[in-house]
Image (cartoon, rainbow, N blue to C red):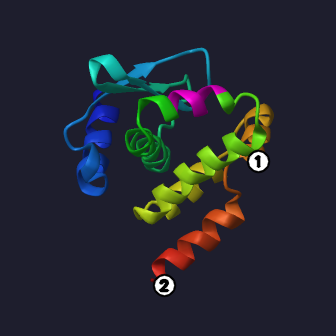
């Protein structure tokens, strides 16, 4: 677990200066695959829940840190509202997940995000990735666009 913490701190300090003073904890969770971010608002820290998947990659970490940055920008009530609405609206969830992908790409993690998404994943997870997240083609296109700026 400490390796994940070190990697998160590295990426956070290098590319997410707005999160500099926020404590982030990694928590193993066997209920879901991949990672989730939980903001414990009243305790002022974030938990990145890592599933049983052993490959918690740089691209995945940048995506989750992007969520945290978005939550911080939106504030508690908007984040809470969107958290619940995303379960009723495919469009809202897609915008949230694609937004986190775009922010990770903007921060310079497009190549790593592409590698993460290209890895072999179970069919049901691949279905979720295709439904809500940027496609491999979109990641590639936005990464190239970002590099040309």
Residue furthest bottom in the image: 148
The quarter in which the C terminus is drawn is bottom left
Percent of width and height locating residue 25: 32, 25
Q: Mark 2 and mark 1: span between their CA atoms?
A: 26 Å
Q: Where does label 2 land, which residue? A: 148
What crowding class fits label 2: few (fewer than 14 Cα within 10 Å), some (14-19), or many (20 or more)?
few
What SS does tag 1 mark? helix
Front residue (pair 68, 10): 68
Q: Earlier in the sequence, mark 2 or mark 1?
A: 1
What SS does tag 2 mark? loop
Front residue (pair 120, 109): 109
Task: Left or right? Give the position of 42 relative to 102.
Answer: left
Against 37, residue 31 (above or below) is above
Q: What residue range appears in magenta?
A: 79-84
Dividing the picture into quadrants, the one containing residue 108 is bottom left
Q: Is residue 142 magenta?
A: no
Q: Main secondary structure of the magenta part?
A: helix
Q: Which mark is residue 130?
A: 1
């Amino acid at each position: 677990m400490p390796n994940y913490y070190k990697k998160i701190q590295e990426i956070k300090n290098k590319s997410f200066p707005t999160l500099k003073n926020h404590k982030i904890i990694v928590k193993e969770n066997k209920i879901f695959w991949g990672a989730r971010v939980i903001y414990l608002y009243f305790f002022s820290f974030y938990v990145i829940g890592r599933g049983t998947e052993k490959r918690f990659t740089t691209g995945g970490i940048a995506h989750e840190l992007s969520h945290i940055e978005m939550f911080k920008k939106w504030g508690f009530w908007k984040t809470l509202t969107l958290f619940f609405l995303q379960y009723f609206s495919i469009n809202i969830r897609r915008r949230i997940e694609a937004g986190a992908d775009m922010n990770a790409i903007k921060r310079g993690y497009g190549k790593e995000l592409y590698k993460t998404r290209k890895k072999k994943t179970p069919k049901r997870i691949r279905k979720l990735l295709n439904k809500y997240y940027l496609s491999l083609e979109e990641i590639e296109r936005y990464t190239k666009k970002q590099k040309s700026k």
